Image (tube, rainbow, N blue to C red):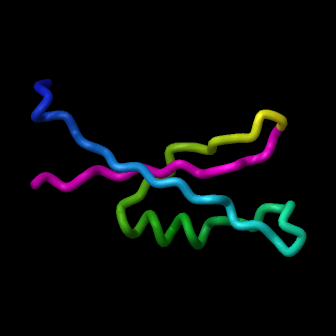
Amino acid sequence: MSLEDRPTWEYKTIEPPKGLTKREVVDPTDELNRLGAEGWELVGPLDYDKGGTKLLILKRRVADE
């Protein structure tokens, strides 16, 4: 596969939504479904060293120009 044939990706990070106490995470399904409809795919979490999720990492393919 040549460099020209390789897909190009763009990345996005979002913070998991927090509840009223700012400690518990609210289910991000609605936000992830909205972003999925825009072509974003969840790659995985970026976690804190001692546990908990800091960011969710998403990617989508850049359209060919």
In the rendered structure, the answer to whether residue 56 lies left or right of residue 39 reads right
Q: Residue at x 70, y 41 (%)?
A: 47
Q: Position of residue 23 (x, y in %)?
A: 86, 61
The residue at the point 31 percent across, 45 percent down is 9
Q: Residue at x 78, y 62 (%)?
A: 25
Residue nearest the viewer, comparing 32 with 51: 51
Left or right: residue 45 versus residue 38 is: right
Residue extending farthest right:
21
Nearer to the camera, 36 or 9: 9
Instruction: Find residue 50 and report its horizontal and vertical position in percent.
Output: 84, 36
**Magenta segment main secondary structure:** strand
Q: Nearer the viewer, residue 19 or 1?
A: 19
Position of 55 with respect to 9 (left or right) is right
**Quick one: 27 or 51, which is closer to the camera?**
51
| Magenta span | 51-65
In the image, residue 55 sits, relative to residue 34, either above or below, namely: above
Using the image, determine if residue 53 lies above or below residue 38. above
| The N terminus - image quarter | top left
Q: Quadrant of the C terminus?
A: bottom left
Asked whether 3 falls inside the magenta stretch, the response is: no
Task: State the image quarter where residue 46 is shown.
Answer: top right
Residue 52 counted in the magenta span: yes
